[in-house]
Image (cartoon, rainbow, N blue to C red):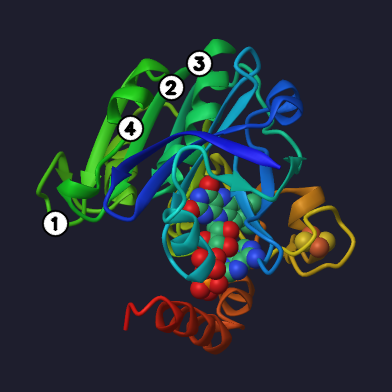
Amino acid sequence: MFRIVHKEKLSPGINLFEIEAPKIAGHANPGQFVVLRLHERGERIPLTIADNDPERGTITIVVQEVGKTTYELGTYKEGDIILDLLGPLGKPSHIDNFGTVVMVGGGVGVAEIYPVAKAMKEAGNHVISILGFRTKELVFWEDKLAEVSDEVIVTTNDGSYGMKGFTTHALAKLFEEGRKIDLVHAVGPVVMMKAVAELTRPYGIRTVASLNPIMVDGTGMCGACRVTVGGEIKFACVDGPEFDAHLIDWDELMKRLVYYRDLELMSFERWKRERGMV
Ligand SMILES: Cc1cc2nc3c(=O)[nH]c(=O)nc-3n(C[C@H](O)[C@H](O)[C@H](O)COP(=O)(O)OP(=O)(O)OC[C@H]3O[C@@H](n4cnc5c(N)ncnc54)[C@H](O)[C@@H]3O)c2cc1C
Ligand code: FES
């Protein structure tokens, strides 16, 4: 059982939870995730380890409310207990001195790029972080990313803060300015990661994306998380979740992610009804 020691609302619909989990905190590397189950009747969902503190024995997750389980987690408070937390899972990010690395985070993906950006910076890279949000009130962790980046560019789709447009507009601008970029690392909505991959492809810039397929066990036993990479089937939970973005079958991933849409909506509606929310 795992206790929430700190909870913070980072922006509407996005909560940070610092959770006591000494063993995971001691072994977590950038790019890895946990599988969480709230209670006896809960499902297992994967969430990235956005930060870890081996001394405090805690890990931090940042969760966007998108459906039943993530909304239910949003109702948890400091002191509450999470039943299961399994991790660290997945392959750690490949960290090296590449030169100039552009980290692209979209929405909750901004929290997910933090540990990788930090490690990239520590490895001696020049780190440019592009953080993308829909609008100003959703912006979070600009300061935290600034601590581990040489440059930070914030974009909002509506132009209410920072540069107007998508993360890809900011990335394209770097190319137009003739900046030398050695690696692009993208985490966020699949449409964003696909767009980043298409943008860097003609330049032949090595691009890595952290994939978010449906997962169940998260340990390689079922294949629910399978993705096609370079024509081969890979299990994102053990072979990834990071892959060469130019080799990923993005359309297949998008189709598989919406496979349970009706059941997800039904389960969320029932949960809300049980609490008198609708
Ligand atoms: C490796 C990995 C790391 C992730 N890290 C984060 C993170 O740090 N923060 C964050 O907010 N989200 C993260 N996600 C996504 C998160 O797991 C889903 O948002 C969550 O499972 C949705 O559950 P739900 O019941 O609230 O919503 P639902 O209504 O059940 O689902 C909404 C959508 O979420 C996706 N989803 C549903 N169930 C799962 C599942 N078991 N596994 C994966 N995706 C699912 C589907 O696309 C679905 O359409 C990550 C996913 C993966 C695979
Ligand atoms: S989630 Fe079952 S193999 Fe990856």
- Of badges 1 and 2, nearer the viewer stands 1
Q: CA distance from mark 4 to mark 3?
A: 17 Å
Q: Residue at x 44, y 45 (%)?
A: 77
* Percent position of residue 96, x then y: 65, 20
Label 4 Cα crowd, 10 Å radius (few <14 / some 14-19 / many 20+): some
Name the amino acid, label 4. Trp
* Rendering quarter of residue 130: top left
Quadrant including the N terminus:
top right
Q: Mark 3–mark 2 contact, CB under 8 Å?
A: yes
In primary-sequence order, the first of circles 1 and 3 is 3
Q: Return the residue nearer the eye: 9 or 166.
A: 9
Q: Residue 69 placed where, x, y %?
A: 54, 65
Vertical comparison of 85 with 18: above or below: below
In front: mark 2 or mark 4?
Answer: 4
Residue drawn at (44%, 63%) of the image = 71
Residue 24, quarter of the rendered image: top right
- SS class of the residue under badge 4? loop
Instruction: Indicate if the residue with disc 2 has its beta carbon within 8 Å of ligand 1.
Output: no
Of callouts 2 and 4, the N-terminal one: 2
Give whichever of discs 3 and 2 has the lower sequence position. Answer: 3
Q: Which residue is mark 2?
A: 127
Badge 1 element:
loop
Q: Secondary structure at mark 2?
A: strand
Residue depicted at 32% across the width and 31% down the height: 178
Q: Quadrant of ligand 1?
A: bottom right
Q: Which residue is mark 1?
A: 158
Label of residue 141 in the image = 4
Q: Amino acid at mark 3?
A: Lys
Name which residue type carries label 1: Asp
Mark 1 or 4: in front is 4
Mark 3: which secondary structure? helix
Callout 1–callout 3 Cβ contact below 8 Å: no
